[in-house]
Amino acid sequence: MNSWLLSLVGIAFLGVLVDILTPNKNMNKFIRSVFAIFLLFVIVSPIKDIFNSKTKLFNIDDNVNIIDDDFLQKNNLLRIRTLEENINAYLIKNNIKGVNVIIAANMLEFDFEILEVAVDIKNLVLTEKINHKNKYEVITNLIRQVINVKKDIIKFYE
């Protein structure tokens, strides 16, 4: 936009300067016509960019869709903490105590994706209902009931 305006002013200024310097009236009319045509081309030149498929109209991607990284990080962190609390509460509700779930996700991406679910089972207390079952399978299935993730991203730490 700045270069277009600079070109417009430059052509107009050059036209006035040449108009002042040429003494012949017939030549003056000819030069005015030539500069008028140049001026017309400079004025119309941005229109071709609007219809060009490579140019985005009004630069929407550059200005409108910018999301503040700090806002995005806080929002995703809130989502992660809520999911962790829901999973921990659901495990306690299903008689699995002493387990702490921590979720790792892409914090600065608009498309929220869970990368890993870390399950700390150092303080796991097994009840009679779960004592004879595979604790890893039981916990994995309960976690997958709360959030829809693949089994391979759930990691157990003792």
Image: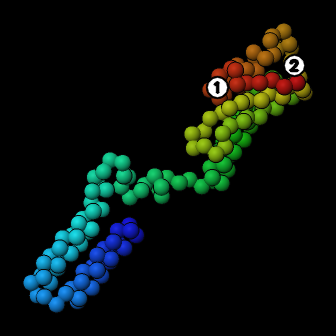
Task: Identify the amino acid type marked 1.
Answer: Val
Task: Identify the amino acid type marked 2.
Answer: Leu
Could you tell me if the residues under marks 2 and 1 are in contact, i.e. CB atoms within 8 Å? no
Location of residue 132 by image quarter: top right
Quadrant of the frame with the N terminus: bottom left
Q: Disc 1 marks which residue?
A: 149
Residue 3 x, y percent position in the rendering: 38, 68
Position of 30 with respect to 61 (left or right) is left
Residue 148 x, y percent position in the rendering: 62, 26
Q: Of circles 2 and 1, which is in front? A: 1
Q: Nearer the viewer, residue 131 or 74?
A: 74
Secondary structure category for the residue under label 2: loop
Position of 149 with respect to 40 (left or right) is right
| Residue, far left | 26
Mark number, residue 126 = 2
Residue at (69% x, 40% y) in the render: 80
Residue at (60% x, 43% y) in the render: 109
Q: Residues within 10 Å of mark 2 (few under 14, many from 20)?
A: some
Closer to the chain start, of discs 2 and 1, is: 2
In three-dimensional space, the C-alpha distance between marks 2 and 1, rounded to whole angstroms, equals 24 Å
Q: Nearer the viewer, residue 94 or 72?
A: 72
Residue at (48% x, 58% y) in the render: 63
